[in-house]
Image: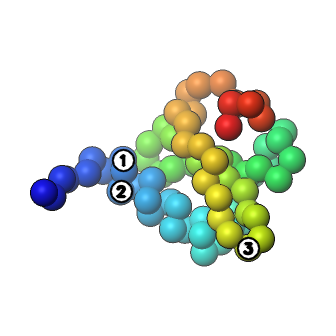
């Protein structure tokens, strides 16, 4: 069965693909090795790091919430 995904899901996927190509995008956070990048047109932030050349998305969070600490990722 095919399920239509909302536009926000498509934008999250598109942002993840962009980060996979350019993992240095975004800004550093207070957590060592973790970067954050905003999702265009939506209030979401992608928290990510690069391990052994591989992008690891740690968390997608509503940017209106407080930033997470290490335990919150």
Q: Is residue 56 left or right of residue 41?
A: right
Using a 10 Å C-alpha cutoff, classify the residue at mark 2 as few (fewer than 14 neighbours), some (14 to 19) or many (20 or more): few
Q: Mark 1 and mark 2 in contact? Answer it, CB < 8 Å.
A: yes
Query: Which corner quadrant holds the N terminus?
Result: bottom left
Closest to the camera, between mark 2 and mark 3, is: 3
Q: Which residue is mark 1?
A: 8
Residue at the location (35% across, 56% down)? 10
Q: Which residue is mark 2?
A: 10
Distance (Cα) linking label 1 and label 2:
5 Å
Q: Is residue 26 visible?
A: no
Residue 19 % position (x, y): 60, 65
Residue 25 % position (x, y): 69, 62
Q: Which residue is mark 3?
A: 53
Q: Earlier in the sequence, mark 3 or mark 1?
A: 1
Q: Is residue 49 left or right of residue 57?
A: right
Residue 3 % position (x, y): 18, 53
Label 1, secondary structure: give it.
helix
Using a 10 Å C-alpha cutoff, classify the residue at mark 1 as few (fewer than 14 neighbours), some (14 to 19) or many (20 or more): some
Closest to the camera, between mark 3 and mark 1, is: 3
Distance (Cα) linking label 3 and label 1:
27 Å
Q: Earlier in the sequence, mark 2 or mark 3?
A: 2
Residue at the location (59% across, 48% down)? 46
- Position of residue 73 relative to residue 58, above or below, is above
């Amino acid at each position: 069965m095919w399920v239509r995904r909302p536009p926000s899901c498509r934008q999250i996927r598109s942002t993840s693909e962009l980060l996979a190509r350019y993992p240095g995008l975004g800004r550093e956070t207070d957590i060592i090795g973790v970067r954050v990048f905003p999702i265009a047109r939506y209030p979401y932030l992608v928290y990510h790091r690069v391990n052994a050349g591989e992008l690891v998305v740690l968390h997608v969070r509503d940017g209106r919430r407080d930033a997470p600490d290490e335990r919150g990722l």
